[in-house]
Image: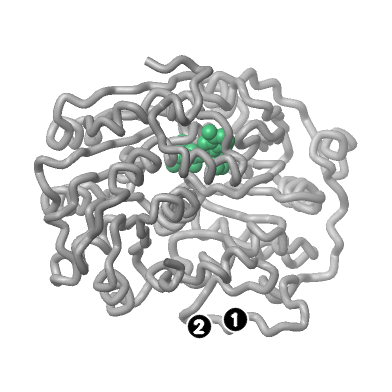
Amino acid sequence: MPDHHSTFADLGLKPVVVHALRRSGVESPFPIQAAVVQDALAGSDILGRAPTGSGKTLAFGLPLLQRLSGGSSRPSRPRSVILAPTRELALQIEKALDEAALAFGVRVAAVVGGVPVRRQAERLARGVDVVVATPGRLDDLAARGFVDLSSVTISVVDEADRMADLGFLPQVVSVLDRTDSTGQRMLFSATLDGDVDDLIRRYLRSPVTHTVDVLPIAERTARHHFFRVVGSEKESVVASIASRDGRTMLFVRTKFAVDRLTESLRSVGVNAAGLHGDKTQANRIRTLASFEAGHVPVLVATDVMARGIHVDSVSVVVHVDPPADAKEYTHRAGRTARAGASGVVVTLATESQVPAAVEVATAAGIDAHFVAVTENDPVLVSVVGARRPPGRPVTDPFSATATGTSTAAPGRSRPGRTPGSSRASRRGVAGRRSGRR
Ligand code: ADP
Ligand code: MG
């Protein structure tokens, strides 16, 4: 059993990938990685429970890639499937595994909804070793004969609890049933209960269980602040926080609230963009790319959409609507102070919301002391750098990205081409990746 001083090489990973990791700034394994990698390399079924931000992607991804390296997949017959609950997460997993996959010569492609089926089918026909997919789209492709999953010998279900929350378990089951029943299976989740338990019982054979408990968030460098506001001032308090320098994520409860708050911020000059499930795939990819590139500094999102999104250096997370429970607090807060960076998590509540908000924070292991603030409060200035909004309305969500080059037209089917977002444009949209190897 590796201790926490072990290196990736000690865990059994090949030098070629250890070097690739080092080049991308990943030097030593996080606890969940130190716990999982050896067993996963040995081919055991794995059950991993660890909170958001703990490093699960590489924990399952590195062993998976190493096990597949050296072999090859026949057209439309991948050897591995990684299931993620949302398109964004699938794309982020694909991206997170990019360097390692390249090092191993393993071909990874994302297969997500919102991209033309024919294009994905063509990509699969050219040969893909690992499919990173949302369950609905992959199941659909399989049912229509565009992909044959019977050669899949390593399956991963990531964020299983969120899959259950979103009602995707039937598609997860259908996909797993199409894979080789003697293959290796790994399931990861922040929590293990209810429907997730059923999935585990049905698909994992004497799994090695690894739990990394206590939320890194309580230990992490994030600072947590709790502000009581009067209802009539909440909007201007939010606007002053959103006017700060740096990347800010604002969480609200509903899609409607995302649109409303985004509009209201833009009307006072804050360049904010909204992310929720009713946006088109192209729009969501573009929004994320702009946020990631820093062109749009403020992202307004619902929980579902924001889960697991990895944008580095989000310095402030604001619970504009208080979180419903500790899990939600943690997931939202997990967007900041990632991988050792510092960050501030702000909870806003009106007087009547305070007791519930205290309870939620306490359950998440955070001491909540609410401080009353008014708009233009110096406390907000010192804690998050709040300032008066610019005032002049921002019209086009992506206008700030226009730097002389033409931006992708709305609705264009090749998103991720925001100028300045070289990573996004280099990668293009999922399913189009080819020619890199
Ligand atoms: P989870 O899936 O558990 O929420 P991720 O796998 O997305 O977490 O990793 C969270 C963040 O930590 C990512 O930004 C990732 O690049 C970074 N990370 C993961 N493992 C390491 C490591 N060993 N060293 C440094 N950063 C890491
Ligand atoms: Mg993850």
Q: Position of residue 54 (x, y in %)?
A: 49, 32
Report crowding for label 2: few under 14, some 14 to 19, many 20 or more residues within 10 A (C-alpha): few
Whether residue 399 sits left or right of residue 92 in the image: it is right
Kind of residue sitting beneath label 1 = Ala
**Which residue position is annotated with label 1?**
408
Q: Looking at the image, which is closer to me, 263 or 157?
A: 157
Which residue shows up at 37% across the image and 61% down it? 110
Does residue 192 show up?
yes
Which residue shows up at 15% across the image and 37% down it? 203
- Can you say whether 27 is above or below 240 in the image? above
Which label is found at residue 20?
none
Location of the C terminus (image quadrant): bottom left
Q: Looking at the image, which is closer to me, 152 or 324?
A: 152
- Can you say whether 190 is above or below 170 in the image? above
Labelled pair 1, 2 in contact (Cβ < 8 Å): yes
- Can you say whether 19 is above or below 353 in the image? below
Kind of residue sitting beneath label 2 = Arg
How far apart in space, not on screen, are marks 1 and 2 (Cα)?
7 Å
Does residue 134 show up?
no
Q: Position of residue 159 (x, y in %)?
A: 36, 41
Location of the N terminus (image quadrant): top left
Quadrant of the image where one finds ligand 2? top left
**Which residue position is annotated with label 2?**
412
Secondary element at image label 2:
loop
